Amino acid sequence: MGLTRKDLLEIRSLEPGEIQTILDTAVSMKEIASREIKKVPALRGKTVVNLFLEPSTRTRTSFEIAGKWLSADVVNVSGSSSSVVKGETLIDTARNIEAMSPDCVVIRHAASGAAHMLARVLRCSVVNAGDGMHEHPTQALLDLLTIREKRGHLDGLSVAIVGDIAHSRVARSNIAGMRKMGMSVTVAGPPTLIPPGVEELGVKVARRLEDALRDVDVIMMLRLQQERMTANYIPSLREYSRLYGLSLEKLRGARDDVLIMHPGPVNRGIEMAPEVADGPYSVILEQVANGVAVRMAILYLLIGAKGTEA
Ligand code: CP
């Protein structure tokens, strides 16, 4: 069965049952990655436009691979190669793309709310691939899939999300998704990068990284979103790294079966030491692999699951 909604814009408004459906569908999609011929006809005749007006490696590539493995026609439009650079508005760009009859537009944009705005004016499905500081729902879904795969369940698990919470759409989507799925969340970072009132989202706040790490099942490190910062939030990168960077030494205070996650791109030596990023607890590349499966599931459930089987 597909999702009954037209768009996937945020985790905040998803029901736990919908999250479960997406994760279960992603599990069935994973098998396709191991085939010699990675192609099923589920989205044959469908067109997906990737409209990425902000840089991306993982999300854009995985949406393209996901669409292609499901036999959709996938078209990529990037900011630098589009008429946005000539002054065209987002709405005009989207309406012109829709005039070519795509079934789904996947949008990444620096402005919070950009995906919602497109969803209101376009008849086709819209998927939010990250909008400003608001949400990155497909990232949270692939993170939940990775945790569920490793632990067998989500309910009752505890997570520490560490770093630049204030500017992070990944943190916002993950907090919403994890709370919905019965997980407990602690956020940690410099006081300037913890949004006031974050406790209202149902999370605990730890000021010291060492306190946040103790006894959690998962540690999720975040990148400093310097492109979204409008002031100096930290004294220096060196100071930030000393206090909030995950080193092997700090990791000694964590559980010996802890999972270490990062949405990427990783700034090695700042939020995470290279030996931690590449170490035995790290599931960072498994997150990336699961990104393809989750995006296949989302495309299939939104535009392909009307009476067809994958
Ligand atoms: N995690 C993530 O969104 O990575 P990209 O910016 O490379 O897509």
Image (spheres, grey):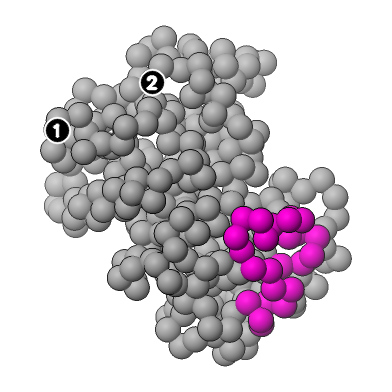
The residue located at (33%, 40%) in the rendering is 298
Asked which quadrant contains residue 79, the reply is top right
The residue located at (31%, 36%) in the rendering is 3
Determine crowd level at label 2: few under 14, some 14-19, many 20+ residues with C-alpha closer than 10 A.
some
In this view, the residue in front, 291 or 113, is 113
The residue located at (52%, 63%) in the rendering is 262
| Amino acid type for the residue under numbered disc 1 | Thr
Q: Going by the image, does 289 lie left or right of 83?
A: left
Magenta range is 189-212
Q: Going by the image, does 286 lie left or right of 27?
A: right
Residue assigned mark 2 = 124
Give residue 212's position: percent from left, percent from top: 63, 77
Relative to 70, is 117 above or below? above
Give residue 239's position: percent from left, percent from top: 80, 73
Does the numbered disc 1 mark a residue whose Cβ is under 8 Å from ligand 1? no
255 is within the stretch colored magenta: no
Residue assigned mark 1 = 308
Instruction: Please state, as top left, top right, bottom left or bottom right, where the C terminus lies in the image.
Output: top left
Give residue 209's position: percent from left, percent from top: 67, 77
Residue 83 visible here: no
